Image: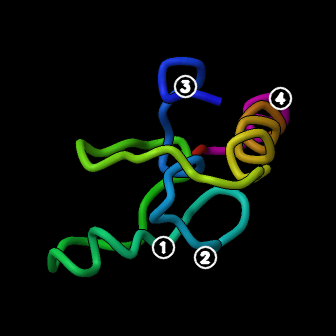
Amino acid sequence: MKKGDVERFCGNCDSHNSYEYPVRIFCSTRYAQGKEAIVDTLWRCSDWNLVSQECYCVKEAQMEKKLRVRNGKVIT
């Protein structure tokens, strides 16, 4: 898979680690830069780099977002 073939989200970046699965992740790049390291899975910063192995974080976060909207919950 090439970078141009995927939507860019924190959840498919090589710097992400599960934090509050599936809606938030821990970003090791932002942590090393002294920035807020806990971010939304469906967010993206300028340091995005495609993850090298298959990951379901984005797919699961998108399903969770749809579920929250369907159930009338506030999305945070």
Q: Is residue 19 left or right of residue 46?
A: right
Q: Which residue is mark 2?
A: 19
Comes first in the chain, label 4 or label 1:
1
The answer for how far apart the CA atoms under marks 2 and 4 are is: 24 Å
Q: Which residues are magenta?
A: 68-74
Residue 44 position within the rendered picture, expressed as x and y whole percent measured from the top left: 38, 42
Comes first in the chain, label 2 or label 4:
2
Contact check, label 2 and label 4, Cβ < 8 Å: no
Q: Which residue is mark 1?
A: 26
Q: Is residue 41 visible?
A: yes
The answer for how far apart the CA atoms under marks 3 and 1 are is: 19 Å
The answer for how far apart the CA atoms under marks 1 and 2 are is: 6 Å
The residue under label 3 is which amino acid type?
Answer: Glu
The answer for how far apart the CA atoms under marks 2 and 3 are is: 21 Å
The answer for how far apart the CA atoms under marks 4 and 1 are is: 27 Å
Q: Which residue is mark 3?
A: 7
